[in-house]
Image (cartoon, rainbow, N blue to C red):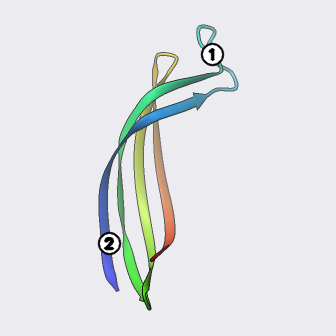
């Protein structure tokens, strides 16, 4: 078993859509988004591969119709690394 810890910076284009947009904006907008992600977990060797089980927290911010929208996500991940 080996511990895994990661910290990542995020940046990119966000496509944000709304079913009921404000009168001054369209149904969808593309904005520049940014944020960070922290993950921690364990790696379990399986021969030449590794099974990874991780928990992650992501905070991401974008803008829609002049308003800041912040997403907080907590997730559980499993991965098979070759």
On residue 42, the disc is none
Task: Name the residue located 50 percent from the left edge and 65 percent from the top edge.
Answer: 76
Which sits earlier in the primary sequence, circle 2 or circle 1?
A: 2
Residue at the extreme right = 19
Task: Name the residue located 42 percent from the left edge and 60 percent from the top edge.
Answer: 56
Which element carries disc 2, helix, strand or loop? Answer: strand
Q: Is residue 67 above or below residue 54?
A: above
Q: Is residue 58 above or below residue 54?
A: above
Task: For label 1, count other residues whose C-alpha is less than 10 Å away and answer few (under 14), some (14-19) or many (20+).
Answer: some
Nearer the observer, 82 or 69: 82
Spatial CA distance of label 2 from label 1 is 42 Å
Q: Which residue is mark 2?
A: 4
The reply, left or right, for residue 4 in relation to residue 51 is left
Residue 2's spot in the image, x, y percent?
31, 82
Nearer the observer, 21 or 49: 49
Residue 46's spot in the image, x, y percent?
46, 89
Task: Name the residue located 64 percent from the left edge and 18 percent from the top edge.
Answer: 21
Quadrant of the rendered image containing residue 49: bottom left
Image quadrant where one finds the C terminus: bottom left
Quadrant of the rendered image containing residue 52: bottom left
Residue at the extreme top = 24
Q: Is residue 22 above or below residue 44?
A: above
Determine whether label 2 and label 1 are within 8 Å by CB: no
Task: Name the residue located 63 percent from the left edge and 15 percent from the top edge.
Answer: 26
Residue 16's spot in the image, x, y percent?
56, 30
Task: For label 2, count other residues whose C-alpha is less than 10 Å away and answer few (under 14), some (14-19) or many (20+).
Answer: few
Nearer the observer, 58 or 44: 44
Image quadrant where one finds the N terminus: bottom left
The reply, left or right, for residue 14 in relation to residue 25 is left
Which element carries disc 1, helix, strand or loop? Answer: loop
Q: Which residue is mark 1?
A: 26
Q: Is residue 80 above or below residue 25?
A: below
């Amino acid at each position: 078993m080996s511990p895994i810890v990661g910290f990542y910076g995020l940046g990119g284009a966000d496509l944000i859509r709304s079913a009921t947009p404000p009168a001054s904006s369209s149904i969808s907008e593309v904005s520049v988004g940014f944020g960070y992600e922290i993950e921690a977990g364990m790696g379990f060797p399986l021969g030449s591969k590794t099974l990874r089980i991780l928990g992650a927290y992501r905070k991401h911010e974008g803008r829609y119709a002049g308003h800041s929208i912040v997403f907080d996500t907590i997730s559980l991940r499993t991965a098979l690394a070759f």
